[in-house]
Image (spheres, helix red, strand yellow):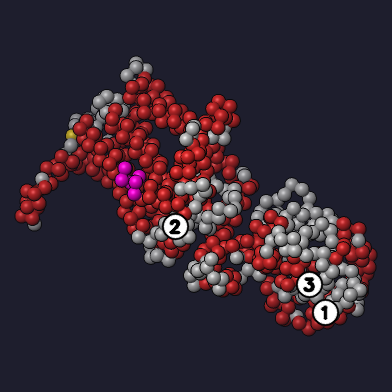
Amino acid sequence: MKRLVDWIDDRTGCRRLVREALFESVPGGARWRYIWGSTLTFCFAIQIITGLALWMAYSPSASTAWESVYYIQHELAGGWILRGIHHFTAQAMHVLLVLHLLQVIVDGAYRAPREVNYWFGIVLLALTLGLGLTGYLLPWDQKGYGATKVATNLVGLVPFVGASLQKLVIGGADYGHFTLTRFFALHAGILPGAMIVAIVAHVALFRRHGITAKKPLRGPDAAFWPDQVLMDAVACLAVLAAVMYLTLRHHGAELLAPANPSEPFNAARPEWYFLFLFEFLKLEVLTRLFGHHGAIVVPTLVMGVLAAMPFVARWRLGHRFNLGFLGILLAGAMALTVRSLNKDANNVDYQAALDQARFEALRIAEMIKANGGIPKIGASGLLHNDPATAGPKLFVQHCASCHRYAGHDGLGIVPPDAPGAPDLHGFATRRWLADFLDARQITNHAFYGGTKFRDGKMVKYVREKLPKLAARDTNAFSAMIAAVSAEAALPAQKGIDARESAMIEEGRKHTRETFGCTDCHAFRKADDDVSAPELTGWGSREWVIGIIADPSHPRFYGKKNDRMPALVKDGRISANEAGLLADWLRGDIDALRVARAVGNIPAP
């Protein structure tokens, strides 16, 4: 073995390199404050290794990026751990960079003759921020897409060349495939290459000038080996332990549903280490002082001050000014970050959008599993044809101006105005129908309280005649409710409807005879003389699609329709979208059924 090492040393001079690295003099001996550079190098090495491994399974295109990350996260052996380590190590690098910068400024290691090395450190800080920004988009999920759009919009604010520069960055007039490929080229090639060059230069200059020790020295000079090496190793191990803890606790990095450029995402935020800037740009004083260019001017001024610190330090009070500026900068950044997090925690729209995004992520994973893989139409195609995710969005767009769903708009937001039509949560269930036929509830806003029907025949019947009929035979009333609700054939009531088929059959007789519902409604046979919505198939998929398509059809409200638009007839939504809305309202959202149906849709 010694002969082999001697041979290698003769050709490479490796012993001298190792000796210079391990036995470099540390003024004042080993100290914990010198660990930051080593931990940053360790983190960068982790990023290179995990990044290359992720690259082997990643496919950078708008139609395959999310799908490939899903494969890494859910199917590749150890993929979620790999992705989690890469994600949380990136966050650790930002924290460590700030600590390293703080240590350099406090120790005065930025002053002559170390100015150039300090500037390389500032360049490394900028490159690390760039890596964080470009990597955030690569999963092509809602969070990354929305955050990147917020960040790249700032490029358009650059004076004179903003529009052209933004177009260059995003690869065209809008965000899409070329945005992703450009960000991937930056993240996996250009920025890491530049960072390696900067690190080599930084380390070379560091070795030229040596460690800057804070005076007075606490002890005699000592070699880098073994004490400082041990401290650096312990610090690197602590960083790795923290990264692994976060990875295991969060089961890797979060992956939301695929990006949908056609829909706004109210939870679009940058990563937490950019939140201070996101919040700072909302300050009214910034707009008053700099107008729309404040987002460019202020960060540029801050970076300029950081770069000028070696020159400022030449003044008598320059070093103290630099310490004060950095302290104010860090305190302000932390305060703005906390402020942003607190505002989001109390922002109903933000929380609802985030909850919906996480639900969609769980839902699409459920459908992919049920389908045995991602179909030809892709993950986005699954989502767009899923009633559980598309239904509430259609409800918000076309129904929530009048209707509510469990008191909200379908996506968790409670509109400020009172509803003008019935609440459709649980529509056609026995419980919903029983509440509707309750004299105390029918004129509530959950039913007819906001409609013109509150003064109609149905309300009069429910308030005056029905209570007496129901009191005479409560079993008949329950059977009638079961019979009418059974027309919907709701998936949630399939079991009880089958068990109580005899009661339902009896209830059909009571519907016609005991309660006289057929005086106004058609039920199980055609009747051209009735004037109210027919009860044949009431609440069924076909019935709900029909009333969504054209509520003024004679089968439904006819000329008595109260403001409800004909969504399909008027071309506001397609027949397929009406089906998605109907399935969601009826709770017909079984993942296996949906996945099988959607999986047969050909790729576009």
Query: Is 12 above or below relative to 305?
Result: below
Could you say which is closer to the camera, residue 398 or residue 87? Answer: 398
Q: Magenta residues: mostly which secondary structure?
A: helix
> Disc 2, disc 1: CB below 8 Å?
no
Q: Which residue is mark 1?
A: 524
The residue that appears at 87% across and 68% down in the rendered structure is: 532
Q: Element under label 2?
A: loop
Marks 3/1: CA distance?
10 Å
Q: Which residue is mark 3?
A: 538
Please name the amino acid that badge 2 sits on: Ser
> Disc 2, disc 3: CB below 8 Å?
no
Q: Which residue is mark 2?
A: 61
Please name the amino acid that badge 3 sits on: Trp
Q: Element under label 3?
A: loop
Label 3 neighbour load within 10 Å: few <14, some 14-19, many 20+: some
Any part of residue 235 in sight = no
Query: Is 419 above or below relative to 555?
Result: above
Q: Is residue 326 left or right of residue 550?
A: left
**Disc assigned to residue 356:** none
Q: Which residues are magenta?
A: 189-194
Provide residue 113's location: percent of width, then percent of height.
25, 26
Q: Element under label 1?
A: loop
